[in-house]
Amino acid sequence: MKECECCGNTYDKAFEIQIGNTTHTFDSFQCAINVLAPRCAHCKVPIIGHGMEGNGQTFCCAHCARKAGVAELADRAPDQGAAAV
């Protein structure tokens, strides 16, 4: 059994994530996200998914980007989120 590097729990279903030459061990996705997910440059929440990038920073949404002075990002595509037909 391996120990989670985030919470210290020893768990028989722990898993490893390899990034480059570094291997991380976690007991849950929650712990993996807590340690590995990028954080929004404005509000600091972990970004689960693509996020938004502007001025060399990563944001969780366009609102946070605007608060940080990055005005060119938008939360919706020009079609206002309409499904393609």
Image (cartoon, rainbow, N blue to C red):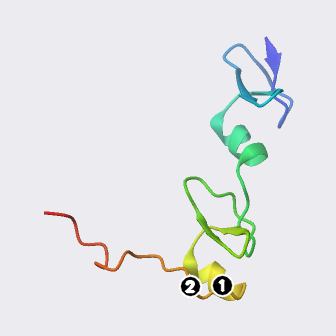
- The image shows residue 70, relative to residue 48, as above or below, that is below
Q: Could you give the CA–CA distance between mark 2 and mark 1, rounded to whole angstroms?
A: 6 Å
71 displayed left or right of 16: left
Q: Which mark is residue 70?
A: 1
Relative image position of residue 60 (x, y in whole percent): 61, 67
Residue 46: quadrant of the picture: bottom right
At a point 70% along the width and 63% down the height, the residue shown is 45
At a point 83% along the width and 37% down the height, the residue shown is 6
At a point 85% along the width and 32% down the height, the residue shown is 5
Relative image position of residue 48 (x, y in whole percent): 59, 53
24 displayed left or right of 62: right
81 displayed left or right of 32: left
The disc labelled 1 sits on which kind of residue? Val
Considering every residue shown, the one lying at the far left of the view is 85
Callout 2: SS: loop
Residue 42: quadrant of the picture: bottom right
- Residue picked out by circle 2: 72
On-image quarter of the N terminus? top right
Judging depth in this view, the residue of 55 and 23 nearest the camera is: 55
- The image shows residue 7, relative to residue 62, as above or below, that is above
